[in-house]
Image: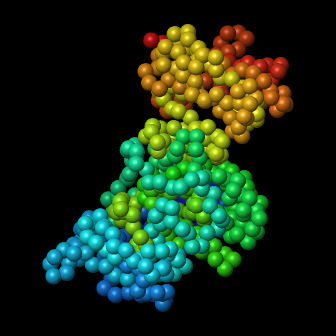
Amino acid sequence: MVQAGACPHCGAPLGPDTVFCGSCGALVASPTPPTPPAGPEFAATPNVPPPTMTTPVTAPPAGPPAGPPKKNPNTNIIIGALVAVAVLIAGAVFLTKDDDKSATSTTSTAGTAAATTTVTSIAGTTTTLAEGVLDPTALGEGEVLLEPVNSETVTPFTPSARRGSERVPTVSLPQIPIPTTTAPLPEGQVPLPQVNGNVPGLYGGTRNAAECDQQAMIEYLEQNPDKAAAWAGVQGIAVSEIRAYIESLTPVVLTRDTRVTNHGFRNGQAFAHPSVLQAGHAVFVDRWGVPRAKCSCGNPLTPPIPLTRPPTYVGNPWPTWDPTIIIVIIAADPIVDGIVLVDLDTGELIIRTIGATPDTPDLATGDVRVTLRWSDVADIDLSVTDPLGETVSYGNSSVSSGGALDVDANSSCSEPTASPAENIIWSSDAPRGSYVVTVNLYSSCEAGDSHPFELTALVGGVPVQLYQGTPGGSLTPTGGSGVVSSGAPTVTFVFDVGGVS
């Protein structure tokens, strides 16, 4: 039996003696990772979705907060102006000095370098902040670390597995549902809305340029058993499962400032600390869309644990930092077909395969999308004939109805990819009627003779029923799985879009 806490597979709360997670159905095989105790505002309940998270924001105390002695007690400055904004929004009042409405500040307790700088906060006031790298082991009770993009980590698990530098999204982001709570909150508190990890457009990425490399993180952990054991313990898996687990994670970019529980490594073990990651951080997410590792340092991530007191945010804020618009990402239904990302270069939506590696192609989406996936170096071709009788294929990449070949993989056995896919789309105004899909083995490319594949057809982003013909001429529903070989090189499917026009 495991203790009450969070499911290590999907992040849902677990009750006492829980064996199977009620949200994702996974077997909970090991204790939950060490985290701060849950706050009294919400108790874990088995077999139900997590309750709405409400983490308070309040004005800084008049003096240093209570707790154990801190390192360099006068080297960091808390973001008083920002906290004052949160208090105003929550129904409190601005802190004032001689009625001039200037925000107050107080001393941070987290250790850092001694240089200072002056920045302008979102409240329009200036606050003196300490520069340098904060030490999360020095956080006091109720303190939450602000982590800007491209910032150094004091206690990393691994060298960076990030590909390139992090950047704050500048494209127009799609609207996502951000729930609110109607529960009464004490004065000075504001809610942290929970957002399901499977919401399309929640995350970002640059097409065909995965931001993180799973193998770099895996190889380092395999060479450092002490860190591997601590990393696996946080995730609730066995050390022997690290490779398969990390390979199942998908690299994405946060598009909103996100509260997490970060885990550093010190003195041979992991230690948990609450953090807010700035939008633009590259992270690995699981198949529920929940952040599980920070790419720049390898630190394992888990969902945040409610604090037992109003938080004090410490560290250097970014220009858009606002304590009232942080989100928390939770697990809902698992993502099957791929994570819908916003392309950080174009603002368009793209599809990233679960577990995508740096050489896995991202896919375009549209009104109609037909995607073929397989897992070897064979050259398998996808073609689709539309209701007008025109066929999109590798030899005819576009047709007058708007259909186009988006991705062609392993062409002529050259430059094979680890996770090949072919993708054909109608970006808009796809003609109504029956579409005929053909999967054809062009060449085995020395990959054996039998090649399993998965075919998916989506209309308006929703999977539709595929059918296969039978010897009697009738159509039989199918899930889209199949096999091509030299003895049976072609498989044909049919699906319908909105009835015959």
Residue 11 spot, x, y in % from top left: 56, 59
Does residue 399 appear in this view?
A: yes
Residue 99 spot, x, y in % from top left: 15, 78
Total marks placed: 0
The outermost residue toward the left is 99
Q: Residue at point 67% right, 53% down?
A: 214
In the image, 74 versus 87, the foreground residue is 74
Q: Residue at point 26% right, 70% down?
A: 125
In the image, 127 versus 400, the foreground residue is 127
Residue 260 spot, x, y in % from top left: 50, 64
Q: Is residue 467 above or below residue 69?
A: above
Q: Residue at point 74% right, 25% down?
A: 412
Locate residue 168: give its quadrant.
bottom left
Q: Residue at point 57% right, 73% down?
A: 154
Q: Quadrant of the C terminus?
A: top left
In the image, 70 versus 469, the foreground residue is 70
Q: 380 left or right of 64?
A: right
Q: 158 left or right of 139?
A: right
Does residue 286 appear in this view?
A: no
Q: 25 left or right of 113?
A: right
Locate residue 323: give its quadrant.
bottom left
